[in-house]
Amino acid sequence: MTLAEIEQLLQQSVDRALGALAGAKSADELESCRVQYLGQKGFLSQAKKSVGQLPTVDDKKKAGKLANDADARLGKAYDEHKQRIEAAAREAELAERWDVTLPGRRALRGRRHPLTVTADDILDVLGALGFVRAEGPEIEHDWYNFEALNVPRDHPARDMQDTFYIDDDVVLRTHTSPVQVRAMLAIGKPPIRVACYGRVYRNDHDITHSPMFHQVEGLYVDGSVTFGDLKGTLQVFVERIFGAKSKVRLRPSFFPFTEPSVEVDVSCFSCNGTGSGGATVGDDGRCRLCKATGWIEIMGAGMVDPEVLRFGGLDPDKLTGFAFGIGVERVAMLRWGVSDIRLFFENDRRFLRQF
Ligand code: PHE
């Protein structure tokens, strides 16, 4: 072949080969193109072989450059198209296994349990009032749970709470009040102002009572803590938890570890303390939440009995204090209108995700 013939061969064939490479639809088609055009019997090899037979160095140079340029263009086109085909094949394979158009599975986002929300709110209010967190064990000595709280063995007051006994001296605590004495003994000197949140246990179950439930205990002991301080603290407490219009009412009651003792009522936030109408009104026009009384009982409280201060290592002639204990489930049930306490413990997400 002459230089002109080589030039012509390359000119004609390169475009054809590029077209064929670009048109290849599979790896197999691409491979046969490669063999046909770039292989040993292809025009490129033929052209390269002819280069060596050209008569002059000058022609060899020119033809060699043409052949090398053609080789480079085709090689590049081949590599690029090969990548395209492989990517397409990979995608086709994926599409076969996974339908990427299907809606995804939504990730579950956790949230606080309604009892945790309620306890956190209660503890936040008490924290703002200067109460610091305290803790005690759920498996408690009889002494802390009863005796140091002025409930001697065989005293009828023991029957106020139906106790789970581990043995003669150890119980599942029936309330958070044992933390009162623990805090007094641990802190030792006034002011003692603690809040304790935790589980308590009583052998009792129906739709408003669970054998395990939660309480928040508050205790404040100092040089001149009065019953007025208790009432003021409770008033702020109900305003923050049940709404700014809430009122507090104290009714005489009895606990062995407080004297005087009270039951604490909050004005009904459903009927606004009127006993009628409101969000929970019945067919007869009466408020069902407070049973038309206008008041809802929420906790027990009182002035710490001098005997309990003494058990806590404090001098009742110099110090006074108040204490209160609130049931967390009860507050949560009132707040969200939950009628069955067991819902809190069944972990049914349809219930829990409503809060
Ligand atoms: N411990 C009492 C109860 O569980 C509540 C209470 C706490 C009463 C503190 C007075 C003072 O019923």
Image (cartoon, rainbow, N blue to C red):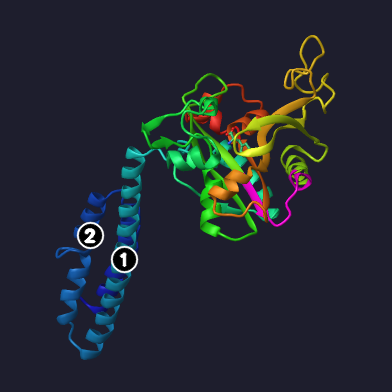
Q: Which residue is mark 1?
A: 14
The answer to whether residue 61 is seen in the rendering is yes
The answer to whether residue 110 is seen in the rendering is no
Residue at image coords 31%, 51%: 24
Vertical relation: 242 (above or below) 85: above
Q: Position of residue 127 (x, y in %)?
A: 65, 53
Amino acid type at mark 1: Val
Q: Where does the magenta region start and end?
A: 218-230
Q: Which mark is residue 34?
A: 2
Magenta stretch encompasses residue 226 = yes
Q: Position of residue 192 (x, y in %)?
A: 62, 56
Q: Which mark is residue 315?
A: none
| Left or right: where 40 falls relative to 155 | left
Of mark 1 and mark 2, the one earlier in the sequence is: 1
Vertical relation: 131 (above or below) 213: below
Q: Nearer the viewer, residue 15 or 99?
A: 99
Picture quadrant of residue 301: top right
- Disc 1/disc 2 C-alpha distance (Å): 12 Å
| Residue at the farthest top position | 284
| Left or right: where 57 falls relative to 284 | left
